Amino acid sequence: MPKILFIHGPNLGRLGKRKPEIYGYETLAEITEKVEKAVKAKGCSLLAFQSNSEGDLIDFLEANLDAESAIVNPGALMMAGWSLYDALEAFPAPWVEVHLSNVWSREPFRHSSILSPLAKGVVAGFGTLGYLMAVQALIEEEPKT
Ligand code: DQA
């Protein structure tokens, strides 16, 4: 069964409690359940991982290089996570970068992601729906002609 990675970076383990007016009231466990349902309906499995440590995220990616694709919310590592950049550059499968909030409507330091050039695409500002959009983009991609 094709495996899809669902990766969250620093501070995202506190979703639902941390700034819910920006990130929503759903916990990461609740979001993961929704995304898992969507992925399973497409005949794939979801492997979820969250860490506040960049090194742990890299270890997780290295241990799962056989994955079909990945959905990554890097949190603030979008701005300066150069080790994560290297790990994602070495990740052989397509992945989508997701941000719950519209980072461009927020503080200027959130306006650019060093990781985005490596991603297949970026979804930001749609809350949990953004993850489901990423699932659709990765699984239901039109075949290349
Ligand atoms: C975030 C946006 C980042 O700027 C922030 O550091 C986060 C969450 C989002 O999902 O909107 O931790 O990635």
Image (cartoon, rainbow, N blue to C red):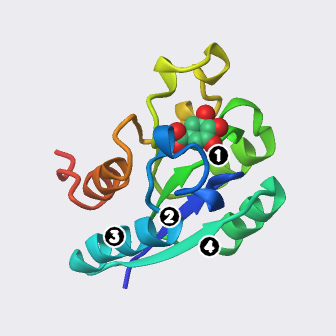
Name which residue type carries label 1. Glu
SS state under label 4: loop
Residue 41 image point, x, y percent: 22, 78
**On the image, numbered disc 3 is attached to which residue?**
34
Question: Which-is-in-front pick, marks 1 and 2?
Answer: 2
**On the image, numbered disc 1 is attached to which residue?**
89
**On the image, numbered disc 2 is attached to which residue?**
27
Name the N-terminal-most of marks 2 and 4. Answer: 2
Q: Are marks 1 and 2 in contact (CB under 8 Å)?
A: no
SS state under label 2: loop
Q: Are marks 1 and 3 in contact (CB under 8 Å)?
A: no
Name the N-terminal-most of marks 1 and 2. Answer: 2
* Label 1 near ligand 1 (CB < 8 Å): no
- The structure residue drawn at horizontal position 46% and vertical position 36%, both measured from the top left corner, is 101
Name the N-terminal-most of marks 4 and 3. Answer: 3
Residue 73 image point, x, y percent: 55, 49
Name which residue type carries label 3. Lys
